[in-house]
Image (cartoon, rainbow, N blue to C red):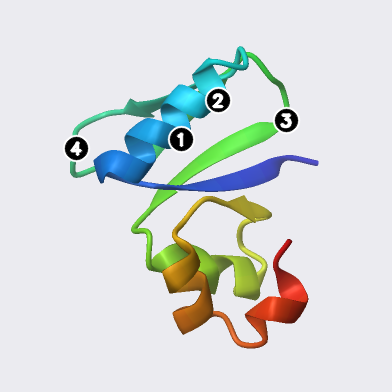
Amino acid sequence: MTIKLGVPSKGRLMEKTFDWFGARGVTLARTGSDREYAGAVDGVTGVELVLLSAGEIPRELAAGRIHLGVTGIDLIREKLAAWDQRVE
């Protein structure tokens, strides 16, 4: 099984997420141009990087199209129903 990790496709949160994983030996990288939502993961097997807008991540989690996601708590509260029962 491949785990799909949703990460913001641009901005400070994307950069901080890439840095956080990088400090732990996992390299996340954008592949292609800034307009493409393609990414790569190096340093761990079985993980696929999915670049999304920060606002799309809660919706994709709820729909089951990604397994893990990094986004702001404000977006979780706004876009994910019953978030307090579903988010750790």
Q: Residues within 10 Å of mark 3 (few under 14, many from 20)?
A: few
Q: Which of the two discs, 1 and 3, labels the residue nearer the N terminus?
A: 1
Residue 37, x across and y down, in percent: 33, 44
Q: Amino acid at mark 2?
A: Phe
Mark 3, residue position: 46
Q: Which mark is residue 21?
A: 2
Q: Amino acid at mark 1?
A: Thr
As helix, strand or loop, the secondary structure at mark 3 comes to loop
Nearer mark to the viewer, of 4 and 1: 1
Q: What residue lies at 55% left-to-right and 25% top-to-bottom?
A: 21
Q: Nearer the viewer, residue 17 or 59?
A: 17
Q: Which of the two discs, 2 and 3, labels the residue nearer the N terminus?
A: 2
Residue 52, x across and y down, in percent: 39, 54
Q: Is residue 84 left or right of residue 69?
A: right
Report which quarter residue 23 is drawn in: top right
Q: Which of the two discs, 4 and 3, labels the residue nearer the N terminus?
A: 4
Residue 37 appears in view:
no
What's the CA distance linking mark 4 and mark 3? 24 Å
Q: Which of the two discs, 4 and 1, labels the residue nearer the N terminus?
A: 1
- Quarter holding the N terminus? top right
7 shown above or below 63: above
Q: Amino acid at mark 3?
A: Gly
Q: Which mark is residue 17?
A: 1
Mark 4, residue position: 34
Report which quarter residue 44 is drawn in: top right
